[in-house]
Image (cartoon, rainbow, N blue to C red):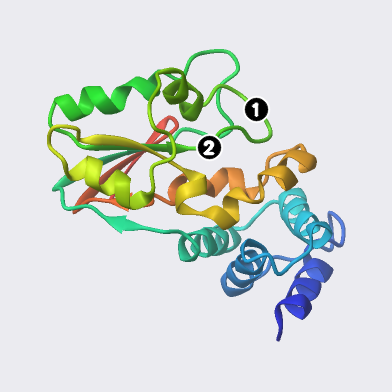
Amino acid sequence: MNTQDLMKSIIQRVATGPDLSKDIAFEEARDGMQAILRGEIDDVRSAIFLIALRMKRESMEENEGILAALLAQSDKQQINVRDLVDLGDPYSGYNRSIPISSFLPPLLAELGLPTVIHGLDSVSPKFGLTHRHINQALGLNVDCSTEQAKNRLENASIGWSYVDQASYCSGLHDLVPLRERLIKRTVINTVETLIGPLRGKTTHSILGKENIWK
């Protein structure tokens, strides 16, 4: 089945109202999302796909399929460090407070814990203050490639880096304008912080208020 027919089939099942909408399989969620990331699906169908999943509530298989698609389209780097701290606050930022975790990477690096923090400039639904904004205000480089971030993390005299979504998953970052027009949060908001473009031998991921140890 080509990607257009696949997306048509998915939409026919997930966008049929509160009582008749059906879940789709992991493989369908993955392949549909990958087609969107590759630019093979137009904005109208992409929007229906994301909103319909949200309206019926995503299943675990669908969440995992969407994440698998994002991982497949991301530039990922293995870091030669024993322990890596991965900070992934919600990418839509904060409106009521300063995200103090922006200041944690250099502190943790000074304590001997290499730390990466990731995000993007601005996205729906909050359009709040983000890690990119704070690092820009401090005059730091916010456009490191994943390779450059890897080098910073492996350099014991630095030991930390910010890496932007535009650098490690450009297809996902290209969806920011569409996400703004959708207004409400989608499954992307749920899983994008899990991509973890940089991984150590052991990675300690701190995502919002929850710690996930890997």
Residue 30 - label: none
In the orientation shown, which residue stands out farthest toward the bottom? 1
Q: Position of residue 133 (x, y in %)?
A: 51, 24
Q: Report the residue at 52% width, 47% height from top.
A: 166
Picture quadrant where residue 33 is located: bottom right
Residue 196 x %, y %: 39, 49
- Mark 1 is on which residue type? Phe
Q: Is residue 11 left or right of residue 25?
A: right
Amino acid at pointer 2: Leu
Give the quarter of the figure containing the N terminus: bottom right
Q: Secondary structure at mark 2?
A: loop
In what element is the residue under mark 1?
A: loop
Query: Residue at point 78% right, 80% down?
Result: 5
Of the pair 3 and 9, the residue shown nearer to us: 3
Left or right relative to 203: residue 92: right
In the rendered view, tell whether residue 141 sits above or below residue 213.
Answer: above
Residue 156 vs 192, above or below: the answer is above
Across and down, in percent, residue 50 comes to: 72, 54
Q: Residues within 10 Å of mark 1 (few under 14, many from 20)?
A: some
Q: Position of residue 178 (x, y in %)?
A: 74, 47
Q: Is residue 167 left or right of residue 154?
A: right
Q: CA distance from mark 2 to mark 1?
A: 10 Å
Q: Which residue is mark 2?
A: 120
Residue appearing at x 59%, y 43% in the figure: 189
Residue 57 or 121: which is nearer the viewer?
121
Q: Is residue 27 visible?
A: yes
The residue where tag 1 is placed is 127
Residue 84 seen in this snapshot:
no
Name the N-terminal-most of marks 2 and 1.
Answer: 2
